Image: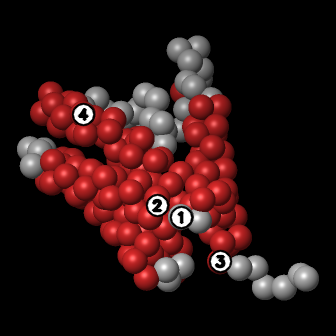
Amino acid sequence: MIGVPNRRSILLTSTVVFLAGIFVFALQHELRPRSTPQAAPEASPRAEPRALTPEEESYAASLWEIHREVTPSAVAMSFAGIAYETETHDARQLERKIEPIGKFFSNAEQRVRGLAVPASLSKVHGQYLEAMALYRKASDEMLEFTKDGARQHLIDAQGMGITASEDLLRAGEVLWRGQYKPH
């Protein structure tokens, strides 16, 4: 019977679309033309971004120590939800996977708050903090689902994860330009 799509198929479809979007973004980023020394000045309409100051570099390096743990945790959270929806349907197993991830994001948020932030990077720092808060809230939503079974929690968590991922990409473009950022 063809009818209204259920929430499981909506969640699965939106997760696939989200992952495809990240792939397309990364592909576009990697395939964009690079300026060459022989290029005419008008061929490069954007000015070259300024180099980070030593204070900004120190902040970026400190944040990277946290960030390198954030990416696999965010992916693990997404895959736990996907595995629940497509394979296990075991709320207890989902809870066991999400609890440590939620604790990680709570700790990561506190670690980011504790960094010395140059005034010039306060906006980027705010974006990164918001991403950590969203990932923590997303894990909380997933845990709420394991308690009450309300699927809206999973849908809300997925939306928060997408927004958090976008915030991380924007912050990464400022702090780690041209470096591989596995989001």
At label 2, the amino acid type is Leu
Q: Earlier in the sequence, mark 3 or mark 4?
A: 3
Q: Secondary structure at mark 2?
A: helix
Q: Is residue 54 above or below residue 36?
A: below
Q: Nearer the viewer, mark 1 or mark 2?
A: 1
Q: CA distance from mark 1 to mark 2?
A: 6 Å
Residue drawn at x 9%, y 49% is: 114
The disc placed on residue 90 is: 1
Looking at the picture, the colour scheme in use is: secondary structure
Q: Nearer the viewer, mark 1 or mark 3?
A: 1
Q: Is the Cβ of the residue at disc 1 closer than 8 Å to that at disc 2?
A: yes
The residue to which callout 3 is attached is 7
At label 3, the amino acid type is Arg
Q: Nearer the viewer, mark 4 or mark 1?
A: 1
Q: Secondary structure at mark 1?
A: loop
Left or right: 155 with respect to 24? left
Residue drawn at x 58%, y 14% is: 38
Quarter of the figure that contains the N terminus: bottom right
Left or right: 133 with respect to 170? left
